[in-house]
Amino acid sequence: MALVKQLVECVWPRSEEEREASFRELGFESGAEFERGQYASNTKSYALSTILPGEVFGSWCSFNGNFMGINLQTYSVMEPESPTARRGHDEIQSQLTALYGEPIRPWDDEEFPPSIWEVNGREIVMHFFHLRDSGVMLSIDDSELAAAAEAQATARSQNEPPRL
C-alpha cells in the first residue's frame, strides 16, 4: 500500500528523465519491451522489476511516448479458487477503500467485477482472477493517458478485420 500511495501522491513523470528518476526512487528497474503483436499501437509495455517482497510480476506502459502507468500481479497461484489469493484481494480492497472510498464497479454481472478508484488524476484498477488460476492484478495509471489509450484501442478494434 505504501507503493500505491506514493504513485497516487507523487508528481507524475512527464518526461523520460522524470520517469527514470521516479523509478530509481521507487526501486523499480525497467526491462525489455514486450512484443506488440501484428497490429501497431501507440501503447508500449515493458517488463518491470520491483523491490516488493514475494513473487510479483510487474510491467509498465507508455502511450505516445508518455509514461502511462504500472501493472502489478501478485498472489498468483496456479489453482482455481485459492484462499490465499482471495485473502490478498480482500485485504488490498479493504485498504484501498479505507484510503480512497468505495470503488466504482463498471459491471455488476460478475462475481468479482473490477474495482476502480479515481484519485489525484490517477486510476487504480484492481482485478481478481479465480476461475482457472488465481491472482490479483493492480494497475495505477495516469487517468487521461489511460482514457486516450482505451479510446484508441476501441477505435482500432472497430476497424480491424475479423480474425479467423
Image (tube, grey):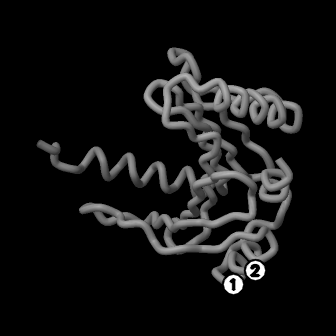
- Residue 74 in percent (x, y) is at 63, 45
* Residue type, numbered disc 1: Glu
* Residue type, numbered disc 2: Ala
Which residue reaches farthest left?
Answer: 164
Secondary structure at badge 2 equals helix
Q: Which quadrant holds the C terminus?
A: top left
Pointer 1 residue:
17
Circles 1 and 2, Cβ within 8 Å, touching? The answer is yes
In this rendered view, identify the residue nearer to me: 6 or 28. 28
- Residue 71 in percent (x, y) is at 60, 53
Separation of residues labelled 1 and 2 (CA atoms): 6 Å
Q: Is residue 74 left or right of residue 149?
A: right
Secondary structure at badge 1 equals helix
Residue at image point 49% right, 36% down:
78
Dot in front, 1 or 2: 2
- Residue 79 in percent (x, y) is at 49, 30
> From what the image shows, is residue 130 above or below residue 10?
above
In this rendered view, identify the residue nearer to me: 1 or 51. 51
Instruction: State how many labels appear.
Output: 2
**Among the 4 quarters of the image, the one containing residue 20:** bottom right
> From what the image shows, is residue 75 above or below residue 7?
above
Whether residue 143 appears in this view of the structure is: no
Q: Is residue 79 left or right of residue 105?
A: left
- Residue 24 in percent (x, y) is at 76, 77
Q: Is residue 43 left or right of residue 27?
A: left
Residue at image point 59% right, 58% down:
58
Pointer 2 residue:
21
